[in-house]
């Protein structure tokens, strides 16, 4: 066990877990500097609405992978299966798969076969259904849903522009990835997609404080002030300025 010689009251636990206790805590602005709610979207929205204290919000993780034309098909299948099934109940699991129409004919039958073996239910656009007959039709609500389950929304898009537009409309600023061999297109995706982690040729499951070298993760922020993305202890520190003078005055 590591010892840091901290006072025993450096960490405090509140034994009560009822909503009344939470509401009282959210009003204690003279004692508490920051609230980081961990739980479902309903809890986080309730805390954000009631709190007099700054809140680090993470409503949901509607994470996307976009498979570009000319992507490495074998690599893309492996990444997408990992992103969906390795731990489907976590916020950095893929919830929507976007596939360029020039890659869909080869990619969707291959990836859907493996996803089906893993028990994943696909909900697809009309083009997806033509390539994966066992998939279910997607509804408008599917595109913005965080399933946290073995369910995946799939859409075939005509271009990378349309994929980026889809992410802007339905994403949650959490995690997005592009699978491509084209460096210039990858760089454009990184520039134009505004999420806390944007990856090239890697699984969305890497958006995790420990995986990114931040140590133990305290949370993932989808708000931009002050921390955006995974937060370790460094991201929770504040700056204190100290100055020594010898009679200096400002003129």
Image: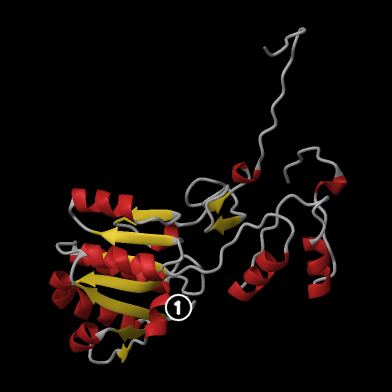
* Residue 220 in the figure: left or right of residue 12: left
Mark 1 crowd level (few <14, some 14–19, many ≥20, 10 Å Cα): many
Q: Percent x, y for residue 72?
A: 19, 62
Residue visible at 83% across and 73% down in the picture: 20
Which quarter of the figure has residue 39?
bottom right
Residue visible at 22% across and 63% down in the picture: 160
* Residue 235 in the figure: left or right of residue 127: right
Q: Which residue is mark 1?
A: 145
In the picture, the quarter occupied by the C terminus is top right
* Residue 58 in the figure: left or right of residue 127: right
Front one among 176 and 157:
157
Q: Percent x, y for residue 25?
A: 81, 62
Residue 162 versus residue 112 in the image, above or below: above
Residue visible at 74% across and 49% down in the picture: 33
Q: Percent x, y for residue 82?
A: 37, 68
Residue 84 versus residue 131 in the image, above or below: above
């Amino acid at each position: 066990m590591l010892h840091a010689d901290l006072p025993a009251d450096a960490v405090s636990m509140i034994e009560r877990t009822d909503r009344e206790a939470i509401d009282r805590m959210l009003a204690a602005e003279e004692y508490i500097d920051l609230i980081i709610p961990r739980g479902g979207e309903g809890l986080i929205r309730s805390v954000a609405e009631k709190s007099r204290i700054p809140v680090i919000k993470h409503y949901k993780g509607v994470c996307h992978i976009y498979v570009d034309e000319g992507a490495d098909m074998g690599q893309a299948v492996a990444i997408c299966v990992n992103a969906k099934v390795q731990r489907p109940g976590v916020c950095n699991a893929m919830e929507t798969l976007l596939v360029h129409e020039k890659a869909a004919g080869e990619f969707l039958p291959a990836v859907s076969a493996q996803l089906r073996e893993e028990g994943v239910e696909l909900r697809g656009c009309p083009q997806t259904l033509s390539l994966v007959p066992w998939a279910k039709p997607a509804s408008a609500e599917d595109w913005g849903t965080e399933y946290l389950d073995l369910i995946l929304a799939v859409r075939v898009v005509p271009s990378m522009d349309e994929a980026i537009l889809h992410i802007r409309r339905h994403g949650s600023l959490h995690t997005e990835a592009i699978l491509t061999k084209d460096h210039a297109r990858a760089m454009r995706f990184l520039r134009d997609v505004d999420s806390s982690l944007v990856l090239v040729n890697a699984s969305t499951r890497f958006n995790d404080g420990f995986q990114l070298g931040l140590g133990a993760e305290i949370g993932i922020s989808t708000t931009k002030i002050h921390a955006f993305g995974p937060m370790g202890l460094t991201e929770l520190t504040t700056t204190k300025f100290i100055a020594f003078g010898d009679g200096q005055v400002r003129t």
